[in-house]
Amino acid sequence: MSGVASRLAAATPGGIARELEAPVPGRRRRGIRIRGLGLPIYTALALIFLLIPIAYTFVFSFNDSGKLNIAWQGFTLDKWTNVCSAQGVCEAFANSILVGVVATVLATALGTAIAIALVRYRFRARGAISLLLFLPMATPEVVLGAGLAAQFLSLGVNKGLMTIIIAHTMFCISFVVVTVKARVASLDPALEEAGRDLYGSAVAVFWRITFPLLLPGIAAAALLSFALSFDDFIITNFNSGAVDTFPKFIYIAAARGIPAEANVVASAVFILAIVLVVVAQVTRAARARRTARLQR
């Protein structure tokens, strides 16, 4: 009887409507599958879009080209074995390394001291200084570069490597302060107090307790500063004079065709960065496994 009743109920208009409105399991699974593919497809397209210029640079570093490195002429390793054969490539790269290292050291030292002072001490104009340190990060590089160029011109300073280093140190300090400041704020002051309770001097407490705890943040700030300095073009172009850095060399050479040797340098820098990241991740994972093993 129950089966007959159910068939009769299904035969009614309301039953037929309910059956029509009921979702089909196969259709639901297909809809979920299609929606689930959206994110992977979007991610793959984004990665392809980001990696196309890098792939182009790497592939054309093996191009057997002359002055123009636009059309593929054939495979060769001569550009990798004779990187400095193109005039100005190695000199510009060396200038970028020099400027990046010096600006990073100066900005990291000054920025770390400023970050510690802003977090640990109370003094007048503390809030104003924090605000002023954020301004170079929010100001367009064109404004910073033009302003610094005007200052150097009014002071009668000849533009060259020194003015580039000063300019890069100025805008890198803000990034160092922001990065190290977050690390300083996360430290437990009780650790330093324990060091002073054990009759450690202020210098000993800083180098044996504070500095090792701040070192990850300082290293991150230094790497960020070097990357920003090495990659900068706008501020450098305003304050470099006749000195060429690698980004400036690329910009000037783009008008007549970037030589394959510049692609070699760019590819080598990219590969080095990837290797450093992989080594850092592997080292961190090994340290984490070692720590977990000791805690057992």
Image (cartoon, rainbow, N blue to C red):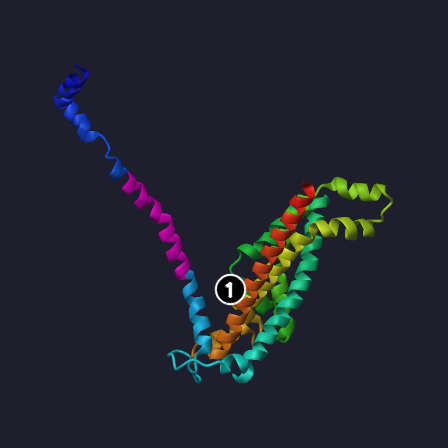
The image shows residue 33, relative to residue 166, as above or below, that is above
Picture coordinates of residue 177 (x, y %)? 64, 53
Q: Which of 265 and 164 is in front in this view?
A: 265
Q: Nearer the viewer, residue 296 or 126?
A: 296
Q: Nearer the viewer, residue 236 or 154?
A: 236
Within 10 angstroms of label 1, few (less than 14), some, or many (20 or more) residues? few
Locate residue 215 relative to residue 237 in the image: left or right: right
Q: Residue at x 57, y 75 (%)?
A: 93
The image shows residue 270, relative to residue 180, as above or below, that is below
Picture coordinates of residue 39 (x, y %)? 37, 48
**Residue 8 in sight from this viewpoint:** yes
Q: Residue at x 56, y 56 (%)?
A: 137
Q: Residue at x 64, y 72 (%)?
A: 98
Q: Mark 1 points at which residue?
A: 142
Farthest top residue in view: 1
The image shows residue 77, relative to residue 168, as above or below, that is below
Picture coordinates of residue 83 (x, y %)? 54, 80
The image shows residue 257, relative to residue 193, as above or below, that is below
The magenta segment is 29-49
Locate residue 33 relative to residue 210 in the image: left or right: left
**Residue 242 in sight from this viewpoint:** no
Q: Mark 1: which amino acid?
A: Val
Looking at the image, how many numbered discs can be counted on the residues?
1
Q: Which residue is drawn at 61% across and 60% down?
A: 223
Main secondary structure found in the magenta portion: helix
Picture coordinates of residue 14 (x, y %)? 15, 22
Q: Quadrant of the N terminus?
A: top left
Locate residue 123 relative to residue 236 in the image: left or right: right
Residue 102 among those drawn in magenta = no
Q: Quadrant of the C terminus?
A: top right
Locate residue 121 relative to residue 88 in the image: left or right: right
